[in-house]
Image (spheres, helix red, strand yellow):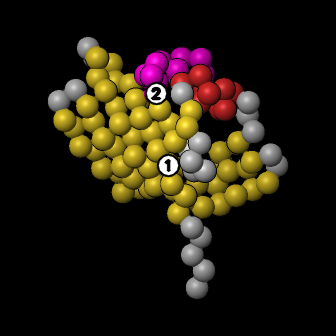
Amino acid sequence: MTSRSGDLLADDLVHISFDGQVAGKAEYMAFFKQGAWQYRKYEPTNVKVKVFGQMAVVTGRVNREIVINGQETIGAFVSTHVWSRSGDRWRLTSSQVTTIPNQTS
C-alpha cells in the first residue's frame, strides 16, 4: 500500500480481521506496511454492490495465495465492506473478513 492508500480509509475505520481482532485505521495501515504478508493472487469473485444514498455495502469472495512470514497459504475468504461518500470521494468505513474453511473431498 502506498502512503496515498490511506486516503481510501475513513479516519474512524473499524476493521474486523479473520481472527476476530478489531483494528482502526492506524493499526490497519501499520499491518500492511510491516510487509509480513505478500500477495501472489487476489482474485475477487461474486462481488455485489448495494448503494444506499451516501453509503454502499460491498460483499464478495476473494480467492487468494499469500506468503505469510515465508509460508505459502492458499485459500479464500468472504468480506463485507461498508463505504461512505463525502462529496466526490468514497472511503472505507467498516470492513469484516471471514476465512472460508478449506474443503476436502
- Residues at marks 1 and 2 touching, judged by CB atoms closer than 8 Å: no
Residue 4 included in the magenta stretch of the image: yes
Q: Position of residue 34 (x, y in %)?
A: 73, 30
Q: Position of residue 36 (x, y in %)?
A: 75, 39
Q: Earlier in the sequence, mark 1 or mark 2?
A: 2
Is residue 29 something that shows in the picture?
yes
At x 44%, y 49%, the residue is: 79
C-alpha gap between disc 1 and disc 2: 14 Å
Mark 1 crowd level (few <14, some 14–19, many ≥20, 10 Å Cα): many
- The answer to whether residue 42 is above or below residue 53 is below
Outermost residue, top side: 87
Res. 97 mark: 1
Q: Which residues are magenta?
A: 1-13
At x 28%, y 44%, the residue is: 49
Where's the N terminus, which quadrant?
Answer: top right
At x 26%, y 31%, the residue is: 55
Is residue 41 something that shows in the picture?
no
At x 38%, y 25%, the residue is: 91
- The answer to whether residue 100 is above or below residue 84 is below
Residue labelled with disc 2 = 13
Quarter of the image for residue 74 reads bottom right
